[in-house]
Image (cartoon, grey):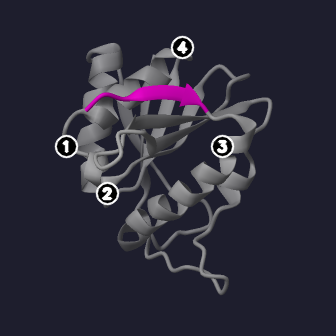
Amino acid sequence: MTVAVRPVTDDQWPIVAWLWQDFRHDLAPVVNGFPYADGRYRHEWLDEYPAPDRCGYLAWAPHPNTGEDAPVGFALVRGLDAEERAMQAFFVVPAARRGGLGRRFALDVIGRHPGPWAIPFQHDNLAAVSFWRAVATDVSGSAWTETTEPVPGKPDVPPDHWIRTP
C-alpha cells in the first residue's frame, strides 16, 4: 500500500480528532478505558496540539473503494524544542496494518526530526512491543534502550515501557 506522510494542516485537526477516537477505542482494552458522558474517549493530549513544540502528521493512502486519499493514521510528536523528541501518540487504522505501512510511517516521522527519541507504550500492548522494538532497531541498530517507568498517578497499573534512541 502506498502511503503519503504530510504534516497536519490547521484545517485537518478535526480529521485527527476523529482518528483519535479510533486510537483510544483501540487502546481501551489495554488501559481499561471507557468513553466519558459525551461519548468521547479522553482527549486532553490531543487538545495540546498544535503548539510551537508539538506537531502532527497524517498518513494518507488510496481508499480501496474510491481511490481518493484517505487518512489511515496519525502521529503526534512533542519536544520539538527539546533535546529529545517523543512520540506522544501513534495510530494506524486496523485495515491498513500488517503490510508495513505503520513501520514506514513511523520511520518517516522519526526521520523528519533527527536526534534522540523517546517512544512510550503500555505494558500490555503486545503489538506495540514488537512494533516499536523493530522501529528502534531500524533507526539506531542495537543502540536503543528500553526501560519501564511507573504511570504517573496510577500506582495500580503496570509501568509503561519507554524506548529511547541515541
Find out whether the residues at labels 4 and 1 contact each other: C-beta distance under 8 Å.
no
Q: Is residue 5 magenta?
A: yes
The numbered mark, 4 or 1, whose residue comes first in the sequence reads: 1
Task: Write the residue at 68% across / 24% down.
Answer: 80
The numbered mark, 2 or 4, whose residue comes first in the sequence reads: 4
Q: CA distance from mark 4 to mark 1?
A: 28 Å
Which residue in the protein does label 4 denote?
115
Which residue in the protein does label 2 denote?
125
The numbered mark, 3 or 2, whose residue comes first in the sequence reads: 3
| Residue 89 visible in the shown view | yes
Task: Write the residue at 53% across / 12% down.
Answer: 114
Amino acid carrying mark 4 in the image? Gly
Disc 4 element: loop
Task: Tell me: 108 left or right of 48.
Answer: left
Which residue in the protein does label 1 denote?
98
Which residue in the protein does label 3 denote?
12
Which percent across, then down, holds residue 17? 62, 56
